[in-house]
Image (cartoon, rainbow, N blue to C red):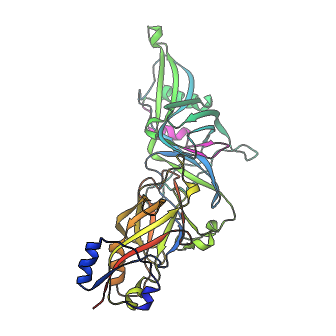
Amino acid sequence: MTGALVGAMACSDTVSDIGNEFLDDLGFDVTVVDTLTLEISTIRFDSLITDEGRLVLGNGYEDYIGSFRTGSFFNILPADEVSTLVGTDVEYDSITFFFNTDGFFYYDSIGEFNAMLYETSEELEPQEDNRYYNNQNFEVNTDINGDSITIANSFFSVRANDNEIEFRISDDLGTAIFDLYEDEVFVGFDDLEDIILGYYLEFLSNESFFIGIDKSRSGFRIFYQDQDETDIDERDKILTFFIDPANSFHSLSLNENESAVNRIEDVEESLPSDSTDNESYIQSLIGLAFRIDIPNLRSILEDNPNLQIFSAELELEIQEQSISTLTPLPSPLTLQIVGERNEFEETFQNQAFPFIDAEFNRENLYFADVTSFINTELSRSGNENRGLLLIPTFEYSTSVRRVVIQDQEFDSRLVLNVLVNND
């Protein structure tokens, strides 16, 4: 065994005594190397697709990013109940917005919101790939002073497990839509868009709080009376306009602070953890992820040609203060193999999961078996430095779940279980 290897490893009994005796007979020593240099950095995606799944609404604050909020742009589908009210004796009553939560919440499980609904002054249009992104915004109608005009401004309390919540919105909108149904033989999507190009909804709270809305069970209701009904009890009617799943998404607004994370200008940049108090970050929806590099990996085999790696385990220390029942960790994390400028190359087959290391009394860890990645990197030709990018496997663009990882100055490490040939 060379002196270089001895100086770069810590030893422990990683196999049984019987196993050690067997390997000794074959001329091998069993060793654990856990002091390799592990570089952890934060990267930031330019944009994320946000037109699938739930709508995320709310606002929050993190020291490493500043304050942020999300709002939802959407269109509505024609009414489910009828396609026209032409020739009927009907009378408009009121209009509401209703929504159903889908069980997602973050930072708190109960909150008070001020809901504000606006009409957009421009048509909602996706990007060239026909998708909507978290960095897209559309103008809303303003008054002569340039202030945004609300068509609803309602205060309400919500719990994460609440079912339906409903509040009144402007009757000017309600009568405009209702008149359309009284005048047109058939009302389609384009007819509704001729009245209102689109809508923008935001929920603002004094505290950090986000909830998820099931857009398949949310939209507008118009209440009216049908005088043609002979039974008075049957005269109350409803037109229901659900949110259009193909034209709805949540958009991100940031009030950035002076943190180093906000100086990341491009997805090709990696911000080292020593620039952020020895921490790196995942923040869903905002697009933060962290990257792992092992810069001295090749030198191990170069200095120790008699060494064979039979397992490699990545252990990432989670900042304890960032974990609570109200801020659950994303699980699992997907590992992507990326190039020097964070360009995607392939998805690694294993994932990282929260893990409790009972042997060493370490509770706040992410653990991943990266043996095949390490062996692949050691066998590759060329000098390109490839790394591992970690992002949530699920709901990266439809939640605000975060992870704060502490680097090697704490207890994050790569553990190599190796065989050393003594012959």
Res 78 seen here: yes
Q: Residue at x 50, y 50 (%)?
A: 328
Residue 385 locus on image (x, y percent): 44, 81
Q: Quadrant of residue 144?
A: top right
Q: Nearer the viewer, residue 91 or 290?
A: 290
Q: In this picture, is 108 found above or below 183? A: below
Res 135 seen here: no
Label tally: 0
Quadrant of the rendering where the N terminus is positioned: bottom left
Q: Residue at x 65, y 42 (%)?
A: 205
Residue 186 locus on image (x, y percent): 42, 31
Q: Nearer the viewer, residue 235 or 213?
A: 213
Q: In this picture, is 327 found above or below 171? A: below
Q: Is residue 192 magenta?
A: yes
Q: Is 409 situated left or right of 365 in this image? A: right
Magenta residues span 186-210
Q: Quadrant of residue 315?
A: bottom left
Residue 106 locus on image (x, y percent): 54, 46
Residue 297 locus on image (x, y percent): 42, 82
Q: Nearer the viewer, residue 389 or 27?
A: 27
Q: Residue at x 76, y 45 (%)?
A: 145
